[in-house]
Image (cartoon, grey):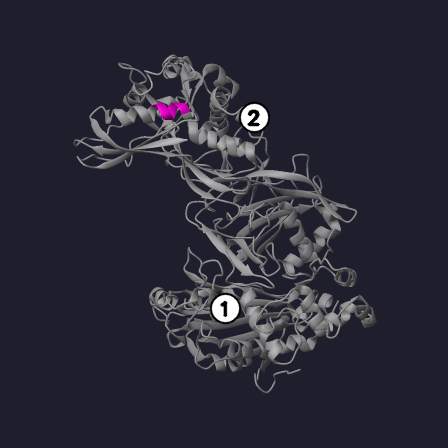
Amino acid sequence: MTTLNRSELLFVYDAQDCNPNGNPIGDNRPRRDPDTGQGIITDVRLKRYLRDQLQDDGFDIYVKKTEGRSHTRTKLIKDVLGGVDDADDLEDLGDVAEAFLDAATDVRYFGSTLSFEASDKDEDEAFRDALNSSLPNNYQGPVQFLPSKSLNEVEENEEYDSLTSVISTGEGNRQGGFDLDDKRIKYGIFPFWGLVDNNGAESTNLSQADVERLDTLCWRALKNQTTSRSKLGQEPRLYVRVEYEEGNYHVGGLQNLLELGDDSSESLRSVKDVVVDVTELVETLERVADRIDTLHVVGDGRLELDIGDETIRADEFWSHLSEAGHDVHEIDVLNERDLA
Amino acid sequence: MRIELALDAVADAAYDRSYFHKARGRIWRGLENDDTFSETHDSNHGVGFSYSNIFPWGQIEEGDRRYFRIASPRRGLLDTLIAHFGRERAFEIGQMRFTIDDITGHAPDVGEAGSTGVLETGTGVHCALGRQLAEEYNLDTSKIDAGESETELFWRPKHGMEPLQDAIRRSLQQTHELYGDDYYDGPGEVDEPLFDRIEPIKDDVVYPVRFQPATAVDRTVLLSKWRFGYRVRDETHRYHLNLALDSGIGQRREHGFGFLNLTDKTLPRASD
Amino acid sequence: MSPHIDANGVPIDCLSFTVRSTWGHFKRVGRSVTKQTYRIPPRTTVAGMLAAIVGADRDSYYDVFGADNSAIAITPLSDLRTVNIPTTGLGTDPKQDVTETAGSWRTYKLTYQNTTGDRQLHSYEVLADPAYRIDVALENEEFYDSLREHLVNGTSIYPPSLGKSEYLAVIEDVEVDREPEVQDIDETLDIDSVVPISLSEAVPQGKVTYGVERSPAVMVRESGGRRTTRFDDYVYAQQASNPVRIGEQTDVAPVQVGDRTVVFR
């Protein structure tokens, strides 16, 4: 067993007048649950932000696009292993799996599939054989996020049909996909529930430093990686990492412990219209306090939280929890950030 | 295969709920001059067609557009009807009077293996069990004994799905033997079920309808309407489902019972 | 103590718990480009989830969930509805060719990709807000005791999920030492759990959709992996509030567990 403690993550971000996660099949419209009207953001989308932020921070990652395009797995692994070009180079590396996990920071978190494409060239085949014999087919990631559904029903931005038609008349834009980017929702607030599996961590060498890095990475990823035209308008609002004592315990389903507060507007347009009721979350944390080692918390002052009859700002949440008797680490996102 | 008649109402009329016999008579007028079909008019096994009601349902006003569908696994039968209806445009079912404005042909297909979809009965399914069958299923035959239900017992939900499914399978097997493609095994010759989802459309599952099987014979029959989900297993299963679309399901299909429509279909992969 | 399971597959006692998530996907083998899901977790998937909780390694636990020494009943607690979640995998291009086909059970729309391109795009048919009540009894004492301890303490060695590792699940409402009471079928009987019968044995009810599935039930370990030795056919009701009605001639052994009537298999 590892020395890591299990952690559970609750990461809330919102999306205003943008497309937080287009559906690649549905004409890139924002994803929605057709029955409940809730917006959907997949774990894949969130993990993409986190990977991109890791890369910007100087960490090597395996799953990436370079020069704006995607690549085969063989190209990716050559890139992440640095200077490895053929089977002989691989042999020189010694323990390929260790070297790979050491380099590929994203794989330590999220795992990856490692089946490499076949090739007609003998040399490439030899490289592929060498890779397959020294790496497993698949690393299961010890850090998982459940695809998120918004707390509110999202409304699609009315303009977007007309926007699309205007833009798509421009020559060549159909191919460029420019028009595809203008599908927006008015506002959605999305709680992600994540888990750091302490036992699964062993299989990808996920370290204590990796886990602690999440505390600044998530927040900064949403700040820094949402700058494209369709993504602009997303902000991190609340992050809580519940670090448990030993014993393989976790509460589960933290996203279900949040709901829209009574004071939220009927129709949401921005963070000013939202109050998130965290009463059940606070009560649950209190109930299991003796299983918790530390709460790692950061909140945004523009989001309001309801706790029972009290309304506080999300940036005061840490002190509220601290007063309730928890050991709280108030995350200083900028000063604690971990750059490679 | 099926044809759809587009009908223009020439007079106001109440919707006639016991149209079955008269509609059948109108279809037969189109077949009676062709020996291939007329010889078997009164035989037990029929010539192999099924038909819808006049839809949409409801009070008819002069000038209304309505539709009527006739399905058959026999291309020749439909060709004969197309020729007939092209000549004789009057389409009158008792007080419901129309002229045929257009005739279109359709060949709905449930899709290749892996496809999923839904078939829905456009008209109720007829399933009556004789004494022997009723006893085979261990059903209570006291009503037959007491003469209350003539010599047959209509299927009811408490009998479970098996008698109904068997009746559907038997009639489909019969159609297969008479008019089907003998390259395939018949529906009665495979173990796998036709459908993998069922939903009765009526609250009480069964409902009574007045039915005249012949002039001057009047009786009430108990029918059921269904939504059936399928997932096509293989080419044989696909053939069975398409055969059901062509011939209808259950008993007395040539009296307008058990007509099927394909209401939803999802192919396993996009066509190239 | 672990429970004895009788010849009808009915255990003396069992554990009960609810497992739920926002999403679930129980991969169904087929030709569809959109990866289809079973509506009910296969018995083998439930076994895998319980093995994760106690920390049993892959391929090590099949004997524990054999045909004669284990009993599992599965009761859907949520309507079995699905939505499609397309995802672009590694090396994807969002502008690749895709086509849409209207379809599926009445309301929902399914979408399929064109696979002729070399880009990868996966579409998953996923269950939305799935929740199941699981009743389980195992004769293997060590495994059963460990499972009970984990469930009662709210712990797990590997966190449970519903079919895919990112579909993290919550376990709740754990009850132990449940004693199933055998039920007689008086003409008909309404069963809350899925019922291992064919559709022909079910008694239809108005506006109630029955579905049937055949999914892997029992596995054995073999050189290089595992092999399914038993598949189960079962009938389920699409809407959680509706039971499956069976007739008195149906050859199953229904039992009462708390206020639910279930059939173990």
Q: Position of residue B92 (x, y in %)?
A: 23, 25
Q: Is residue C166 visible?
A: yes
* Residue A134 to residue C199: above or below: below
Question: What separation in Å lies between label 1 and label 2 (alpha carbons)?
Answer: 57 Å
Q: Which residue is mark 2?
A: B183
User: Was residue B77 drawn as part of the magenta stretch in this picture?
Assistant: yes
Q: Position of residue A112 (x, y in %)?
A: 66, 64
Q: Which residues are magenta?
A: B76-80
Q: Position of residue A183 (x, y in %)?
A: 41, 66
Q: Which residue is mark 1?
A: A191
Q: Residue at x 71, y 67 (%)?
A: A204
Who is closer to the viewer here, C244 or A17?
A17
Q: Would you say B47 lies left or right of C244 here? A: left
Q: Helix, strand or loop at disc 1? A: strand
Where, quadrant-wise, is the N terminus of chain B in this rendering? top left
Q: Chain of mark 1?
A: A
Q: Helix, strand or loop at disc 2? A: loop
Q: Residue at x 32, y 15 (%)?
A: B33
- Number of marks drawn: 2
Dot in front, 1 or 2: 2
* Residue A234 to residue A124: above or below: below
